[in-house]
Image: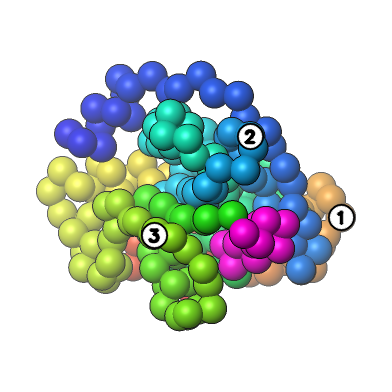
Amino acid sequence: MQTLFPALLRKPANLILKRERLVTPDDDFIDIDFCGEGDQPLVILLHGLTGSSQSVYIKGLQQALLQQGMRSAALNFRGCSGEYNHTSRCYHSGETGDIDFLYRTLRAREPDTPIAAVGFSLGGNVLLKWLGEQGSDVQLFAATVVSVPLVLSACASKLDSGFSKLYRASLLRELKEYVSLKQLHLESLGKTEEAEIIRKIGDLDKITSFWQYDDRVIA
């Protein structure tokens, strides 16, 4: 109910956002939606699986932070900003390169600004893994994660039973479409080698669990 009620009935906040595209070290890009102006503390926001900066929970938190006098920077994981990326590289729960790049970009711009981070679901996994990798090499005044599937294996198995199957089916449908459309996008850009990497994954129609998706796509 906590998932379904806000997803179906909560109205997103009407915010003034500024989108910025950052070119990544591998010559791809990530899109960031900034909310707020000035020199107030800045909070990095990470969405969940198949979400984006437009997810209701992200925009709701941006509104709440703004009311508390804080700015926010909502990261769109690769391919989640409304435009597919230029490489075969995709986001997943263990991919921390993009949040590290975003943090260091922001820190270089604003060396004295207090920065925090919040991650939802898969974004929480990414945040926690990144914090563990960096140790004392980052300067955050706070870090919070929400509804994190900390033990991915147990969560994948839980989604294979009961009412959870409906949630699993919805997520897998979106992920399969994401992979298929990404391949077509790369082909349209003439990036045949990148498209071939995805094509070699094979037909995803028969995938019915996150165990299979992990084995075929993420690995």
At x 23%, y 47%, the residue is 165
Q: Which structural element holds mark 1?
A: loop
Which of discs 3 and 1 lies nearer the camera? The answer is 3
**Which residue is disc 3 drawn over?**
143
Distance, label 2 to label 3, CA atoms, is 21 Å
Q: Tell whether 189 sits left or right of 137.
A: right
- Dot 1 or dot 2, earlier in sequence: 2
Q: Residue furthest right?
A: 190
Q: Residues within 10 Å of mark 2 (few under 14, many from 20)?
A: few
Q: Quadrant of residue 34?
A: top right
Specify start and end residues of the magenta stretch as a single range. 98-112
Distance, label 3 to label 1, CA atoms, is 40 Å
Q: Main secondary structure of the magenta part?
A: helix
The answer to which of 210 and 122 lies nearer the viewer is 122
Query: How many numbered marks, from 0 up?
Result: 3
Locate the N terminus by quadrant: top left
- Residue 39: image location, x then y, percent: 62, 43
At x 78%, y 57%, the residue is 23
- Residue 14: image location, x then y, percent: 51, 19
Q: Tell whether 184 sits left or right of 122.
A: right
Type of amino acid under label 2: Glu
- Dot 2 or dot 3, earlier in sequence: 2
Distance, label 1 to label 2, CA atoms, is 39 Å
Q: Is residue 109 magenta?
A: yes
Q: Residue furthest left?
A: 162
Q: Residues within 10 Å of mark 1 (few under 14, many from 20)?
A: few
Q: Which mark is residue 148?
A: none
**In the rendered view, would you say 23 is above or below 218?**
above
**Which residue is disc 2 drawn over?**
37
The answer to which of 74 and 106 lies nearer the viewer is 106
